[in-house]
Amino acid sequence: MAIVPALLYLKMRQFGGETLNDVMAKIEAEEGAGSKWQQRMRSRLTSVNTPHSRT
Amino acid sequence: MSPEQCRGENLDARSDIYSLGIIAYQMLSGAPPFTGQTTTVMQAHNESQPKPLREHDGKLPKRVSRLIMSALEKDPAARPQSAVAFANAMRANADGLGALYRRAFALYSEYFPKFFKLSLLAHIPVIAVTLMLIGVRLAEPRISKVTKIALLVPITLLQMGAGFVTPSIISGVTAIIITQLAVAPLKPVELRPAFAVLRRRWRPFLNTGIRITLRIVLGFILLVIPGFIMMVRYSLWAPVVLMEGLEKKEARQRARALASRSWRTIILAMLFQILVPAIVGAALGALLGATSEKKAIHVSVFTPLTSLVNISCCR
């Protein structure tokens, strides 16, 4: 039963087409910058979900 | 062909979302949104609104229809911004409440030790207050009425506070853990980072929580239904505060906006969350009451324990 409200929260975000990466990235950013490797991986994960212009 | 492609503008992933929307539209309605000569179709993609999907098939769920129509918006900014967001929204619309409970059960079984530890940690205040209550009840014959009232009033207030804090903590911290699992499934589940978020945001968490609880309590005082409406409206406040760092009015508005995306799902889930603990509590109370020969012991010990079960099951 404890998991249901948490899953509901994620489901409602999904209803609006909101991804989870941004909110998780925000939490991780608050924790601290971390190593360079972590920063690089984080930026790569974020860039996967943002629209890129192409010709 | 997306409107921006028809206009010869720069393209991005949102142009593909439009194309995906067209395919979904054709699959569900049996025909593409626009037909005719190439130039006519291009002009229609650029200028005309497609016929709403529900006009083709009235049985199609509103939310699914709305989502696909949003992929066909002329303005790329009004469409789902990525394939992941589109897929997530589709999945959320396709899965019902049953799938949500099945997923909850699967997650709980897989990570039982972690969730049990989280539950135990969050319940420490409730367990402590319940033990105090049992102690007072058992000592009842040996203490005066005034002492009893002096002890029971603060303990009952503490019990109410603990009863409010515990489910909110569990719900908020679980949201962080589940998000982490969704974003990085291979990363080991750890409680420490989730509790670190709670430690960082405890002030907005308490501020918002107290305000919302007061609204709910007031709602229940004014004939139960307003209380239930408040409960449903703000049911997602704890994950909103901990995950998004919002507080007070902003958190309330965000929780309400999230819930408004599917009132039906939220109301059904809330009813389930209330009914299951009520039934478990009543059954446990009846069972323990039936086996106990001493009714006094039942009142002293089992009533607080039943309320503890209620709080534990509630979230």
Image: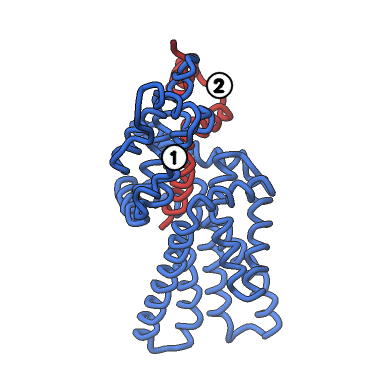
Chain colours: A red, B blue
Q: Quadrant of residue B240?
A: top right
Q: Position of residue B12 (x, y in %)?
A: 45, 19
Q: Which residue is mark 1?
A: B69
Q: Name the residue nearer the viewer: B97 or B76.
A: B76
Instruction: Assign a secondary structure to mark 1.
Output: helix
Task: Specify the subunit that label 2 lies on.
Answer: A
B26 with respect to B252 (left or right): left
- Residue farthest top in this picture: A55
Residue B299 at least partly seen: yes
Q: Which residue is mark 2?
A: A33
Q: Residues within 10 Å of mark 2 (few under 14, many from 20)?
A: few
Say the numbered circle drawn on residue B182.
none
Depth check, mark 2 against mark 1: the one in front is 1
Q: CA distance from mark 2 to mark 1?
A: 40 Å
Residue B281 higher or lower than B210, as above or below: below
Residue A15 higher or lower than B36, as above or below: below
The residue drawn where x is 64% and y is 67% is: B217
Q: Residues within 10 Å of mark 1 (few under 14, many from 20)?
A: many
A30 with respect to B15 (left or right): right
B96 with respect to B263 (left or right): left
Q: Position of residue A18 (x, y in %)?
A: 48, 37
Residue B133 higher or lower than B164, as above or below: below
Q: Amino acid at mark 1?
A: Met
Is there one chain holding both mark 2 and mark 1?
no
Task: Specify the subunit that label 1 lies on.
Answer: B
Residue B149 higher or lower than B50, as above or below: below
The residue drawn where x is 33% and y is 49% is: B103
Q: Position of residue A13 (x, y in %)?
A: 48, 42
Q: Amino acid at mark 2?
A: Ala
The residue drawn where x is 47% and y is 57% is: B266
Dot 2 and dot 1 residues touching (CB under 8 Å): no
Q: Name the residue nearer the viewer: B144 or B130.
A: B130
